[in-house]
Every structure is written in structure tokens, then in C-alpha cells.
Image (spheres, helix red, strand yellow):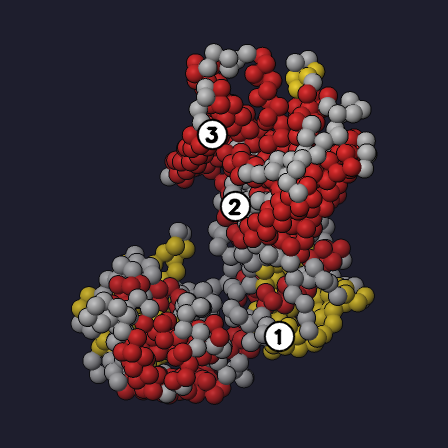
């Protein structure tokens, strides 16, 4: 019994450690950044920081769901889904003169549909997620380019739509307060309190065991890809409201950032384990890091290098802690 | 005859379970020794000790006059002990030839693989063993199971084996292939190789063995020449195990038939299998590993789709397409492999316990009614006396027996009409074992139909009112009342007539 109790505590410690570690990291990075650049802690900067984080946070959330769902789950197509649904939203708003709000709703539905293509191929046909979403990464990206012939679209600055991306309520950017925060709250609540959250972890742990307790494994996994697509499209909506232009390359490279945040947040790459609240903290780490480095005029390539170091450092730390717990 | 392998005082325990106790025998050069015993008698452990997979806790082994203390399978192989396992391992995407010489490819002077030399040696070897030479260039995974086995035997032989261990080599072979295998074994023994032959088939003994030893509960129960291999004598040696702690099994009036299967056929697993289970009754299902017991359970539970046959639940036709259909008809299944098919490691005790019952614990929007869930969990923890510090305790922190109780509770919590338990007490401590055995009898007497699969005959005899015996995918016997004895079950299992 004693050993059992000890094992229990160390597992809980480990979970705690990851999130505590990330929280500490945010504070430390913030301190370092404010030393590097005197402008870092200015209110306007904090605002801009979270505006940037809103988009990538939505993508990371979707990514986290897909990875949690197990069987090698990963969604490389989120960046392209963002680009394509953003472009389609632009076509609807600019070329067809649709209300940007309606166009936004349509974009989210489209995102879910684009995700469902991944879902069908992964869950129903059993193809490897890496290959499927790599293919749609290229396919959707190319479609976005073809639709605009490389140009950009607008028509979003109507009916108060720009407020979603450019205003603040009580000092918090609107897209953070009304989109990102509610989404994370909803997701964390769903993970901890609903049958969906429970089954997500069961499916992520073992397909066969989940099937034996009566879960429709394929249907659940299909839905995760739809969800990831819809969240990426929501990211496009927020981007369009923020920048007021839709570019076919808007989401390029974002999939890797999204994966980085999910994994840094403690989502087990093999599925079934991890907390979405950790993803939120990891988002804060990445945003602080990249924004701060930008302010300090550290070049883009060095920035990504540092992000890589943080990621591998977190993995090493986790490894170290879990090995200690096992030994 | 000179001794090639001699073993004395060999013992091995895994945790608290003694797998092998004080076993000794001598294998002569060119001798063919058959090893017999029930499931769990210690045959596999014995092989693994000789083959260097495990290290013995006590005892000595001598190979060809020198001490044999292999530290790894590679070490044992280098010493001349070659094994063909029941579930062979090889590189499926490489050719047979590459598989034959993998890790020991002949090299030319430049250190490159000498393909021509390799091919020549492969052909010589196959001719010597009377295996078709054409097989050499085929890919391993393009071969039939029998051909794969032949190739592996060839590989085992080519390493200048002094001792060749064959672990139930004939279980997947057809008669023709079996005869070819016997020829090979004979040829090898004439060349002086000592052969340890694990088998469950009595009818093979005279063809493959000069002598046999019988293991029972990890101990040597007999060592006899093949001339004395009379079936009754062997069965006597194998049976007679102590009965489990007493399980109270009150008399009952069998209720209506709850589950009925007829002519179930699953290609490669089941042929024409039928059974009935009544309410209030515990029905045992016995057979050797690979006899098709688990496949039968999986078919009833909707995981395997039969190609022929029919089932009825409570008299109404039943054709499940997946486990959810089975659950909807009140069938619960406790899978054999606790670790990979049962538990959700990394999740807590409560969510493991309520995994199947969850739909009944949901409010609007699929929100889990936590108070109700905890209540259900605590009730089962109390009823089954599950030792968990808290409901939120990680399930992998519990002992094996209590993990199993959590899974048992998971099924009972759904209030099933038909409960199928696949090896419900494997690998758990004696006290918990008795507890679960008693509980499942009570569950049946409560009006549920219980089907128990177990490889432990004493357990099955203690809990079952009736026992079916399967052999090679077929139902070969149904025993009850006076006929339900250890001897009767073993005879049916081994295919020995009275």
C-alpha cells in the first residue's frame, strides 16, 4: 500500500510539475524579455502579444484534441485549412458582398468540412494521419493559391466585424476575450466533465480497449479532425478581423507551431494523456518568447531556434521526471 | 548414449508464483525427448531457461560437458541451443534466404555480403532437410505458416545446433507437413542433435519421441521411455492437481436459455461451434491455448464476424456487428488481457470502473453526473472490497488482483444478463482469486448466465456447473454431473478416447 500511495503521488506530481514548470517558465521568460527590451511590459505590447496568440492558440487547441485521440493522431493541415477558409471567407465577403459575419459562419462550417476529409481518411479508411494531413496540407494550400491567384481579399471592415480583431474590452483584446478564452474554457470543461472528454482519453489510450467498452472509436476520431478543422477556420475568422485581409499564405507554417504548443503543453504525442490547461500555458510561453524576441530584434531564424531549444528542454525535463518517478 | 544437455534442480519463480521447481532431466545426443504438461505446467519456462531468455533462480545446466549458463538468447544460440518458438519471429519483408542468414551473412574478402555463397549454403541446407529450394527467394510473408515454420527450423538447424527445441511445432501444420517435419526431426536426431519437443498431441508421441517427461505445476511428474507411453499413464501424471480453496456452489434450478450458438464458424479460428448457457448457471470453457475459446467469446461479443452459424439471446435472433450490439442485449465481456484490452492506464480508478456504465451517468450535454458516478464507484469498491486509497487513485497503482476487480466491477455495474469472463483470475494473488471465483458463482445464482474461460482446470471445475471443451477450433465435449471430472476434461482436451 505504501508503494502504491507513493506511486500515486509521484504521478500526480508529474502532472502538476508540467503545468507548474510552464507557469514558472512564463514568468521567467517575461522577466528576461522585459530586461532585453524596455518596451516589453508596456500595455500596448501585452495587447499585441495576445492578439497574435489568439490565432495560434485555436490551432493548438485543435491539434491537442487530435493528438489526444491517439493512434498517431496529428493534423498537419491546420495551417492550410486556415488559409483556405480565410480565402473563401474573403470571396464571400468581397466578391459576393456577403455580411462578414455570415461569411465567418460559412468559413467555420467549411473548416469542419475540410477537417472531415482528414477524418474520413484517417478514421474510416485507416490511413496514417501523418500522410493524410500532409496531403491535405498541400492540397488546401494550393487551392487557396489558385482561388486568389496569389492575391489577397478583403471586404471585412463592415458591420463592426473589425472590432472582433482590433478592439479591446477592459484592456483585453476582443478576440481573446470572446473567442480564445471561451474556447479554452469550454474545451477544458469538456475534457474534465463530459463523457466526450472521458472517451477521448480512453480512445487515445487504446483503440481495442475503448472498442470493448462500447465506444465508437472511428466516429469519435472522425469528429476530432472535424473539430480541428473548425477551430483552424475560426482562427481564419480571427485573422481576417485582425488584419482585414485574407492572404492565401496566412496559415503557412502555423501547423508546426500548433504542434509545438500542444506537445510543449504536455499532450503525450502517443495520445491519451495530457491536459488542455497545459496547452494554454504553453501558448503563453510561446507567445511571450516569440513576441519578446521580436521586440528585442532577435531575427526570425534565431527565434525559431530558441523555440526548438525550449521544446527539447521540456521533453528532456519530462523524461527526467518520469524516469525518477519510475525508478 | 552420451549426454548432450543435462539439467538438475532447476527452479524459477516470477514474483510469488513458482513457475518451475527442482526440475532435472538428461537429454542424450541424438535423443528425442517430448515434454508434456497442461497449460501453465512450466513447459515454456523450462524452454526459456534453457534458451537463455530467463535466468534460473537455482539449478545447474550442462551442455555438451560444459556448464551452460546463457545470459541471453544469443548466448544460448552461440552455445548450440536453437529454438523454434510457437509464435515464430522473423523479418517478414525479407526473403527466406536473408532470414536464414540474418546477422551471420557470409562475407567476401572486401567485407561485402557473399550472396552467391549464401545462396549455395541455403540450397544445401534446404536439400538436406528436404525443403523445396524454390522457397529461398520468396519473401517470408508470402509463405504459408507451415512453410515459414520449415524455414525457421532450417535456420535453427543451420547454426550447428547441439540441442534443438521445438515448441508445439505441429499446431499449425497439416498432416502432410507434419510427416515432413517428423522426417526432419528423425534425420537431425540421427545426426546427433538432441531434440526437446513440446507437444500437446498424444498421437504424435510415438513418431517424435524416444522418451518423454511430464511437468505438473512446475514440477517433474514423470520421466518415461516412449515404450511406456500409454495414454492413461500420462493423463494420470498430468492430472491430480490440488483443488482450489472451496468455492461454495449451491444447487440451482437452471433457468431459461440465455445464450445459444449454433454452427458458428470463423475462418481460421472456429468451425461449427455450438453452445448454450442458461440463466443461473456457470458454464466453463476449457481448451489449450489456441483452441479457439477467446475467439468464441469475441464472436459472441461482436468483435469477430462469423462466416456461418447463428446465435440467439433469450430466444431471439442475435447477430452483433460490434460490441455495442452485444451490450445492448445485456452481454458483458471481461477480456483476457487485462493490460492491453482491459485497463486504461493513466486514468484513475473511478473512470476505469465506470467506463461501460458511463452512458447511464450522464446529464444534459453529456456532462457526467459526478456525485452519481462516485456513488456507483464507492458502492462497487465496497461490494468487491477493492483496495484503492481513493476513487481518484491511478488504476495502475493498484495491485494486479485489484485492477482485475475494477474490471470485474466495470462489467457487473452494467447489470448484464450474460457475463463472459476470459481468464478472470490470471496472474492474481490467491486470496483475490478465490474472492472473484466465489463472486462469479453468486452472480450466476443471482439469475445471470455466466460463461467462464480458464486455462486452470481446478478453477474451472470449482466454479462450473457444466464444462465445454474446445480443441483446434471445434467443440469436442460437453461435460456435466458425474462426467465432469479432471480426467474427463483432460481426455477431451488431448483427444484421447476413453
Residue at image mark 3? A300
- Residue highlighted by disc 1: B267
Q: Are marks 2 and 3 on the same chain?
A: yes
Circle 3 sits in a helix, a strand or a loop, which is it? helix
In terms of depth relative to the viewer, which is nearer, A235 or B247? A235
Q: Nearer the viewer, residue A270 or B188?
A: A270
> Which is more foreground, mark 3 or mark 1?
3
Chain identifier of the residue bearing label 3 in the image: A
Disc 2/disc 3 C-alpha distance (Å): 30 Å
Q: Quadrant of the N terminus of chain B?
A: bottom left
Q: Earlier in the sequence, mark 2 or mark 3?
A: 2
Dot 3, crowdedness within 10 Å: few (<14), some or many (≥20)?
few
Q: Point out which mark residue A10 bears.
A: none
Percent coordinates x, y for residue B238 in the rendering: 44, 73
Instruction: Give B79 or B354, whichever is nearer the viewer.
Output: B79
Residue at (60, 67) in percent of width and height? B295
Q: Quadrant of residue B387?
A: top right
- Does residue A49 lie above or below B238 as drawn? above
Query: In the structure shown, which secondary structural element does the residue marked by tag 1 occupy?
Result: loop
**Position of residue A140 measured from the top left corner of the image (x, y, whole percent):** 64, 46
Residue B215 coordinates in the image, percent (x, y):
39, 70
**Does the rendering let one see residue A222?**
no
Looking at the picture, how far across and down is residue B48, in whole percent?
35, 64
- The chain letter under disc 1 is B
Mark nearer the viewer, 1 or 2: 2
Residue most toward the left?
Answer: B65
Horizontal placement of A229 versus B93: left or right?
A: right
Q: In which quarter of the view is residue B230 placed?
A: bottom left
Q: CA distance from mark 3 to mark 1?
A: 60 Å
Residue at label 2? A270
- Asked whether disc 1 touches disc 2, contact meaning CB atoms under 8 Å apart, the reply is no
| Residue for point 68% across, 51% down | A117
Amino acid at each position: 500500500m505504501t508503494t502504491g500511495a507513493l506511486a500515486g503521488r509521484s504521478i500526480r506530481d508529474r502532472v502538476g510539475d508540467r503545468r507548474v514548470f510552464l507557469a514558472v517558465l512564463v514568468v521567467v521568460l517575461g522577466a528576461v524579455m522585459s530586461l532585453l527590451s524596455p518596451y516589453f511590459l508596456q500595455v500596448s505590447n501585452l495587447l499585441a502579444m495576445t492578439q497574435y496568440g489568439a490565432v495560434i492558440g485555436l490551432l493548438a487547441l485543435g491539434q491537442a484534441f487530435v493528438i489526444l485521440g491517439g493512434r498517431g493522431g496529428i493534423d498537419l493541415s491546420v495551417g492550410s485549412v486556415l488559409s483556405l477558409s480565410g480565402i473563401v471567407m474573403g470571396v464571400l465577403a468581397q466578391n459576393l458582398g456577403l455580411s462578414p459575419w455570415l461569411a465567418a459562419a460559412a468559413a467555420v462550417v467549411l473548416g469542419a468540412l475540410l477537417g472531415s476529409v482528414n477524418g474520413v481518411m484517417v478514421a474510416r479508411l485507416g490511413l496514417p494521419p501523418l500522410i493524410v494531413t500532409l496531403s491535405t496540407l498541400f492540397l488546401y494550400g494550393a487551392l487557396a493559391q489558385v482561388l486568389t491567384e496569389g492575391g489577397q481579399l478583403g471586404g471585412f471592415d463592415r458591420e463592426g466585424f473589425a472590432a472582433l480583431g482590433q478592439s479591446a474590452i477592459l484592456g483585453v483584446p476582443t478576440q481573446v476575450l470572446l473567442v480564445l478564452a471561451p474556447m479554452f474554457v469550454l474545451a477544458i470543461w469538456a475534457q474534465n466533465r463530459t463523457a466526450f472528454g472521458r472517451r477521448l482519453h480512453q480512445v487515445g489510450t487504446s483503440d481495442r480497449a475503448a472498442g470493448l467498452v462500447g465506444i465508437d472509436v472511428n466516429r469519435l476520431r472522425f469528429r476530432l479532425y472535424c473539430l480541428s478543422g473548425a477551430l483552424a477556420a475560426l482562427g481564419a475568422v480571427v485573422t481576417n478581423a485582425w488584419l482585414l485581409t485574407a492572404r492565401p499564405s496566412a496559415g503557412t507554417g502555423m501547423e508546426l507551431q500548433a504542434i509545438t504548443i500542444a506537445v510543449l503543453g504536455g499532450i503525450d504525442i502517443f495520445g491519451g494523456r495530457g491536459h488542455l490547461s497545459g496547452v494554454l500555458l504553453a501558448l503563453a510561453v510561446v507567445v511571450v518568447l516569440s513576441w519578446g524576441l521580436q521586440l528585442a530584434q532577435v531575427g526570425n531564424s534565431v527565434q525559431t531556434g530558441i523555440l526548438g531549444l525550449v521544446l527539447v528542454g521540456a521533453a528532456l525535463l519530462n523524461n527526467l521526471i518520469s524516469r525518477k518517478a519510475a525508478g | 548414449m552420451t549426454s548432450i544437455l543435462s539439467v538438475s534442480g532447476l527452479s524459477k519463480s516470477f514474483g510469488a508464483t513458482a513457475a518451475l521447481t527442482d526440475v532435472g532431466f538428461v537429454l542424450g545426443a541424438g535423443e528425442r525427448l517430448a515434454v508434456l504438461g497442461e497449460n501453465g505446467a512450466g513447459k515454456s519456462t523450462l524452454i526459456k531457461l534453457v534458451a537463455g531468455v530467463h535466468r534460473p533462480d537455482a539449478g545447474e545446466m550442462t551442455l555438451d560437458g560444459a556448464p551452460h549458463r546463457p545470459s541471453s538468447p544469443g548466448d544460448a544460440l552461440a552455445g548450440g541451443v536453437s529454438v523454434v518458438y510457437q509464435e515464430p519471429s522473423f523479418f517478414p519483408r525479407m526473403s527466406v534466404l536473408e532470414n536464414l542468414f540474418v546477422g551471420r551473412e557470409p562475407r567476401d574478402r572486401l567485407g561485402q555480403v557473399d550472396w552467391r555463397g549464401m545462396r549455395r549454403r541455403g540450397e544445401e541446407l534446404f536439400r538436406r532437410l528436404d525443403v523445396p529450394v524454390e522457397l529461398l527467394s520468396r519473401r517470408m510473408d508470402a509463405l504459408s505458416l507451415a512453410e515459414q515454420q520449415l524455414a525457421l527450423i532450417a535456420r535453427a538447424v543451420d547454426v550447428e545446433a547441439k540441442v534443438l527445441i521445438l515448441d508445439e511445432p505441429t499446431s499449425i501444420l497439416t498432416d502432410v507437413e507434419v510427416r515432413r517435419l517428423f522426417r526432419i526431426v528423425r534425420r537431425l536426431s540421427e545426426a546427433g542433435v538432441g531434440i526437446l519437443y513440446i507437444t500437446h498431441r498424444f498421437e504424435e508421441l510415438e513418431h517424435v519421441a524416444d522418451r518423454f517427461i511430464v511437468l505438473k505445476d512446475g514440477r517433474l511428474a514423470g520421466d518415461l521411455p516412449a515404450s511406456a507411453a500409454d495414454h492413461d499413464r500420462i493423463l494420470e501424471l498430468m492430472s491430480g492437481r490440488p483443488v482450489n480453496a472451496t468455492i461454495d456452489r449451491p444447487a440451482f434450478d437452471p433457468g431459461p436459455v440465455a445464450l445459444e450458438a449454433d454452427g458458428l464458424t470463423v475462418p481460421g479460428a472456429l468451425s461449427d461451434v455450438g453452445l448454450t448457457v442458461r440463466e443461473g448457471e456457470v458454464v466453463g470453457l476449457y481448451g489449450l491455448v489456441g483452441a479457439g475459446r477467446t475467439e468464441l467469446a469475441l464472436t459472441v461479443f461482436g468483435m469477430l464476424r462469423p462466416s456461418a452459424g447463428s446465435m440467439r439471446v433469450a430466444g431471439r435472433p442475435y447477430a452483433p456487428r460490434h460490441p455495442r450490439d452485444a451490450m445492448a442485449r445485456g452481454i458483458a465481456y471481461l477480456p483476457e488481457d487485462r493490460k492491453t484490452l482491459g485497463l486504461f492506464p493513466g486514468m484513475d480508478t473511478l473512470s476505469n470502473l465506470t467506463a461501460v456504465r458511463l452512458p447511464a451517468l450522464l446529464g444534459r450535454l453529456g456532462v457526467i453526473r459526478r456525485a452519481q458516478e462516485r456513488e456507483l464507484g464507492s458502492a462497487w469498491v465496497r461490494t468487491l472490497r477493492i483496495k484503492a486509497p481513493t476513487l481518484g487513485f491511478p488504476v495502475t497503482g493498484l495491485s494486479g488482483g485489484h485492477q482485475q476487480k475494477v474490471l470485474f466491477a466495470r462489467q457487473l455495474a452494467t447489470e448484464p444478463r450474460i457475463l463472459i469472463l476470459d481468464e478472470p483470475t490470471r496472474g492474481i494473488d490467491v486470496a483475490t482469486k478465490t474472492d472473484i471465483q466465489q463472486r462469479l458463482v453468486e452472480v450466476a445464482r443471482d439469475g445471470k448466465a455466466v460463461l467462464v474461460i480458464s486455462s486452470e482446470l481446478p478453477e474451472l471445475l470449482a466454479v462450473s456447473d457444466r464444462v465445454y471443451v474446445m480443441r483446434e477450433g471445434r467443440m469436442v465435449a460437453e461435460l456435466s454431473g458425474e462426467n465432469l471430472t479432471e480426467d474427463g476434461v483432460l481426455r477431451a482436451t488431448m483427444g484421447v478416447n476413453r
